[in-house]
Image: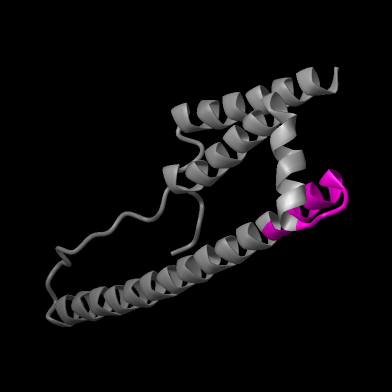
Amino acid sequence: MIIAAGIAFAIVVLAIIIGLLLKRQLREKYATLWLIIGLALLVISVFPGLLLQLTEVLGVEVPANLIFALSIVLLVGVALHLSWELSRAEDEIRRLAEESAILRTDLDELRARFDSRGERSRIHVDPPRDGRAE
């Protein structure tokens, strides 16, 4: 009964990952890790003897302890990777905000130069449509 539940769980995990990939809600670089985890779950569910052999090779007393230890290592790795990705995204956002501020200043200077000549400004930028102030 427990083997069938493990197999069903692994298949559900794989189906969810594949579904998210097909809907483009999960990027491939993240899905690869989760597909490997799902396949490992499926293999261990189908061949539970592999887990017992692995615990003997690694010198772990209880197979559940090995699963918990591997889960903790996996979660720390995922947290570290996501922190790294977040840091990269923050750097990119800061760079884009600075670039946008520079371009906005240049645009304001061009508008002021045209307005000081008494000419009608040919530079027109529509305000944002999402309700944000400019």
Residue 21 in the image: state x and y as whole percent. Answer: 48, 32
54 to 69, vertically: above or below: above
Residue 67 in the image: state x and y as whole percent. Answer: 77, 47
31 to 21, vertically: above or below: below
Q: Quadrant of residue 72?
A: bottom right
The structure residue drawn at horizontal position 61% and vertical position 35%, both measured from the top left corner, is: 38
Q: In which quarter of the image is the C terminus?
A: bottom left
Q: State which region is magenta.
A: 59-73
Q: In which quarter of the image is residue 52?
A: top right
Q: Is 6 or 109 nearer to us in this picture?
A: 6
Task: Considering the whole magenta stretch, tell me its main secondary structure.
Answer: helix
Residue 7 in the image: state x and y as whole percent. Answer: 71, 22
76 to 91, vertically: above or below: above
Residue 2 in the image: state x and y as whole percent. Answer: 84, 23
The structure residue drawn at horizontal position 45% and vertical position 34%, both measured from the top left corner, is: 24
Q: Is 131 or 65 nearer to us in this picture?
A: 65
Check if residue 69 falls in the magenta segment: yes
